[in-house]
């Protein structure tokens, strides 16, 4: 279900450190700031292990590691009511007031506001790897690199350009759509009222995209960010000198960037579009927020996910620890990237170090206190691949960390 690029003859891999948040054992931490008009800042207490998050106009989604979902905030259209039995999810998207989920079998489920058919998933759509949602319309990225769109088409937002292929990511604004191609270029269609579908001249080397409302962000291989489209609140004015960015997300009138070291940078509007312009500080990052693994911008609010250490074992024992070594840029030739690190256990019974690439299975590394593992480049996505490294002791007590490998062509 996940598209992999073919093995390169030579490539550069960038391991992004510091993206795994530490929280209470067995759970994740989600921080929400900005507007709370519909309770979107009231995060449920029973999160468990969360793998990713998404933000709509006034509601939020969290995908748990076991494939189940949690939703909260605005529920006027049922967007925060997760369909019963939906527990095998691998990807999510939140639109203005509808939501999408990709299941393990590659099918898509939609719920929330059904106006103009935004939740009416086309029949026969069975090999989807990711989705995006806008205002009353939806996008699906299929495993063959093509895009399917449905729902409102008032501005041509569901008119996918003829011949569009080689797509590795999609994003949706209010009435426009973006597609990131494997060659690092971006294609856009739909409304251009704010210049949001006019791609900046010379934009290339892109590894991630984000869109919301009427503006866009593109993350480049060098860790820099480009913004375009609406800019009434400075949402497209990327801060001067912003570098070492690992992920981007766009909200309504504001933008977010997650840096390699796990901190968050935000810019744009801090107010609501109401008489008097109430200040809610959606673009003011909470003091002390770090060790962030994922970000999401919504309608006048923002979210950050901090993952916890996974711990499973008897009480009264110390979990083993694991690290990964390497420079930010690791050159690998042929078709293999080499990972290495260390592990330790204060109880003296470290059993193994295991590594999982993407949605694959854990593979035992060579060695324990000093470990090594080779990964075939064919297993790495064209832009970014998640790897999970865990240390295990003889009683099955575990700790793990999550990193990203960004492949530069």
Image (cartoon, grey):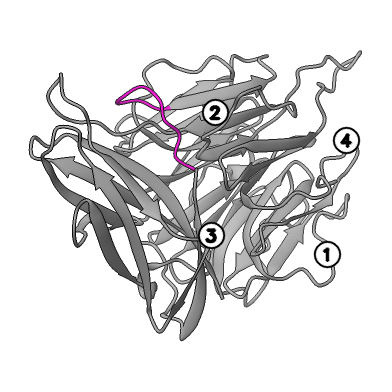
Question: Which of the two discs, 4 and 2, sits closer to the camera?
Answer: 4
Q: Is residue 85 above or below residue 341?
A: above
Residue 128 on the magenta span: no
**CB contact under 8 Å: marks 1 and 2:** no
Q: Position of residue 143 (x, y in %)?
A: 43, 66
Q: How far apart are the alpha carbons under marks 3 and 2?
A: 33 Å
Indicate the secondary structure of the residue bearing disc 4. loop
Quarter holding the C terminus is: bottom right
Q: Nearer the viewer, residue 215 or 249?
A: 249
- From the image, tell me which residue sits under label 3: 328
Mark 3 or mark 4, earlier in chain = 4
Q: How far apart are the alpha carbons under marks 1 and 3?
A: 28 Å
Question: Which of the two discs, 3 and 4, sits closer to the camera?
Answer: 3
Q: Which residues are magenta?
A: 19-28
Using the image, tell me which numbered label, if any, was put on residue 301. Answer: none
Q: Position of residue 272 (x, y in %)?
A: 81, 21
- From the image, tell me which residue sits under label 2: 60
Residue 22 on the magenta span: yes
Q: How far apart are the alpha carbons under marks 3 and 4?
A: 34 Å
Mark 4 or mark 2, earlier in chain = 2
């Amino acid at each position: 279900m996940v598209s992999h690029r073919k093995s390169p003859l030579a490539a550069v891999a960038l391991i992004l450190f510091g993206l795994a948040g530490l929280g209470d054992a067995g759970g994740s931490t989600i921080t929400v700031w900005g507007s709370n008009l519909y309770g979107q800042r009231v995060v449920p207490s029973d999160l468990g292990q969360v793998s990713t998050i998404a933000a709509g106009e006034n509601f939020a989604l969290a995908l748990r590691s076991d494939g189940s979902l949690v939703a909260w905030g605005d529920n006027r259209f049922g967007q925060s009511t997760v369909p019963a039995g939906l527990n095998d999810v691998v990807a999510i998207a939140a639109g203005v007031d509808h939501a999408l989920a990709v299941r393990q079998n590659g099918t898509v489920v939609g719920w929330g506001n059904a106006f103009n058919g935004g939740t009416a998933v086309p029949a026969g759509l069975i090999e989807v790897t990711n989705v995006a949602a806008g205002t009353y319309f939806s996008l699906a990225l299929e495993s063959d690199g093509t895009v399917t769109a449905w729902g409102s088409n008032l501005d041509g937002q569901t008119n996918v350009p003829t011949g569009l292929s080689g797509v590795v990511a999609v994003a949706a604004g209010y009435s426009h759509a973006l597609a990131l191609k494997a060659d690092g270029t971006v294609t856009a269609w739909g409304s251009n009222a704010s210049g949001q579908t006019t791609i900046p001249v010379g934009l290339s080397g892109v590894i991630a995209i984000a869109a919301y409302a009427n503006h866009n962000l593109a993350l480049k291989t060098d860790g820099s960010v480009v913004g375009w489209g609406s800019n009434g609140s400075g949402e497209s004015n990327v801060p001067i000198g912003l570098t070492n960015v690992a992920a981007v997300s766009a909200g309504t009138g504001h933008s977010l960037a997650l840096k390699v070291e796990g901190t968050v940078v935000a810019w744009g509007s801090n107010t609501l579009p109401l008489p008097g312009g109430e200040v809610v500080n959606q673009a003011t990052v909470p003091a002390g927020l770090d060790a962030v693994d994922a970000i999401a911008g919504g309608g006048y609010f923002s979210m950050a996910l901090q993952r916890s250490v996974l711990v499973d074992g008897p009480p009264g024992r110390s979990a083993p620890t694991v690290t990964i070594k390497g420079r930010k840029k690791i050159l690998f030739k042929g078709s293999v990237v080499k990972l290495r690190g260390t592990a330790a256990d204060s109880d003296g019974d470290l059993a193994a170090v295991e590594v999982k690439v993407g949605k694959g299975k854990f593979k035992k590394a060579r060695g324990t206190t000093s470990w090594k593992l080779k990964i075939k480049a064919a297993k790495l996505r064209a832009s970014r691949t998640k790897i999970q490294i865990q240390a295990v002791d003889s009683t099955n007590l575990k700790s793990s960390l999550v990193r990203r490998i960004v492949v530069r062509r």
